[in-house]
Amino acid sequence: MKGQRTERLIRTVSRFLVAPSRQISLTALSGDFGVSKTVISDDVVMIDAALTQEGLGGIQVDRGRTGGASFVPAMSDEMKKQFFEEIVALLSHEDRILPGGLIYYSDIIFNPYYASRLGLAMATLFQNAKPDIVMTSEVKGIPLGLFTAYSLGVPLAVCRFRNRPSDGSAVAVHFPTKTGEVRPMY
């Protein structure tokens, strides 16, 4: 019996983690595992406590007939502090200084280990705003935008300075630059 509960908890956690901020039906979980909704509710309370204690977020439960639960990712203040100290240490190496005093950081933002945590930290800031979409500019903003959108459970929109036919339909927004010229962004 204990083995069945352990497996059910692990499988339930995995469903929450692969679909953050998306509601999962407690009734469906109950049917999938062949247990009552009360048992599933107890499992969800236990999972919520564990995720909260780890500083990764929590489970939000919507009560009622169509009620479900969703994992709301959030990085605890302590976890953010430790992570940003790690980033600061990486960026502080002298070999990262480029001509003109710029700091090389592409290897960090294009590394999924760092980009996913940066996205989680960013999503934590906007979680209460309930955004409909995450918008970023092309290339450098894509990894951070994608992981932020993933954590928030919303789509990502990438703004580009040129539109290709393979991109499909697009809306052009014209904006003035610092030099005074007007440029389109798609």
Image (tube, rainbow, N blue to C red):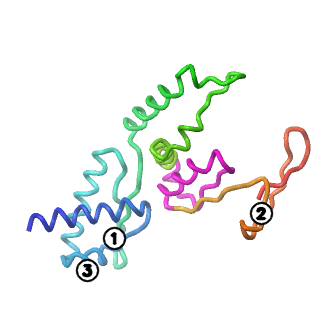
Decide if residue 99 is on the left or right side of residue 180.
left
Distance between mark 3 and mark 1 Cα atoms: 17 Å
Viewer-nearest of discs 3 and 2: 2
N-terminal label among 1 and 2? 1
Residue behind mark 3:
31
Decide if residue 145 is on the left or right side of residue 164.
left
Residue 63 bears which disc, if any?
A: 1
Quarter occupied by the C terminus: bottom right
Q: Quadrant of residue 135?
A: bottom right
The question of residue 139 being in magenta is answered with yes
From the viewer's side, name the closer residue of 111 and 34.
Answer: 111
Magenta stretch in the rendered image: 124-153
Mark 1 element type: loop
Q: In the image, what residue occupies the spot 56% across and 19% down?
A: 94
Placement of 106 over or under 141, stated as above or below: above
What amino acid type should be assigned to the residue bearing mark 1?
Arg
Q: In the image, what residue occupies the spot 74% across and 54% down?
A: 160
The question of residue 107 being in magenta is answered with no
Residue 76 % position (x, y): 38, 41
Residue 37 % position (x, y): 23, 74
What amino acid type should be assigned to the residue bearing mark 3?
Gly
From the viewer's side, name the closer residue of 152 and 140.
Answer: 140
N-terminal label among 3 and 1? 3
Q: Quadrant of residue 133?
A: bottom right
Give the class, few, some or many, for how many residues have Cα within 10 Å of label 2's Cα (few <14, many ≥20): few
Residue behind mark 2:
164
Residue 150 % position (x, y): 50, 57
Distance between mark 1 and mark 2 Cα atoms: 46 Å
Placement of 156 over or under 110, stated as above or below: below
